[in-house]
Image (cartoon, rainbow, N blue to C red):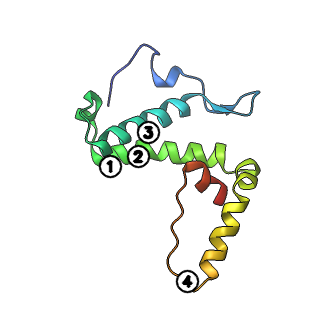
Amino acid sequence: LFGVGRAGRLERIEEPHVNEHGQLVGSVRVLRRLGQLLFYAFASGLQYKLHENVSTPQLYQLLAWQHWYRRISSVNTKYANANAALLSRVLRALSSKQATTFYIGHDSNLDGLA
């Protein structure tokens, strides 16, 4: 899709693994970041040179690496504990017969509820 950049071929980047700090590292980080950046630029309507060679299905395949990465690195007890109060409020709102309630959060909030 893109050619070879300064970091070299993707096959030469270390395989995905968890480092001594508990972080998921290796080639998956490159794919995750690339998919996320391309998707954000595409969704924002920004002209980005890399868009020229990427079809919509390919864009979503790259973005899937971001979702996989977050599923591995962020769906854990740290995020679950941090979002326990939010989960309590959501469950209370779902059991209520009152008007619709909107909650605004971020990826880490969704990770915590997962």
Q: Earlier in the sequence, mark 1 or mark 4?
A: 1
Q: Nearer the viewer, residue 5 or 98?
A: 98
Q: Amino acid at mark 3?
A: Gln
Q: Quadrant of residue 55?
A: top left
> Would you say 13 lies left or right of 5 here?
right
Q: Amino acid at mark 4?
A: Gln
Distance between the alpha carbons at the discs numbered 2 and 3? 11 Å
Judging by the rendered image, the residue that carries numbered circle 4 is 98
Q: Is residue 114 visible?
A: no
- In the image, residue 100 sits, relative to residue 12, either above or below, namely below
Which residue is most to the bottom? 97
Answer few, some or many: residues within 10 Å of disc 1's Cα (few below 14, many 20 plus, some between 14 and 19).
few
Q: Quadrant of residue 63?
A: top left
Judging by the rendered image, the residue that carries numbered circle 2 is 61
Marks 1 & 2, CB-CB < 8 Å contact:
yes
Residue at (52% x, 72% y) in the render: 101
From the viewer's perspective, is the residue at label 2 or at label 3 nearer? 3
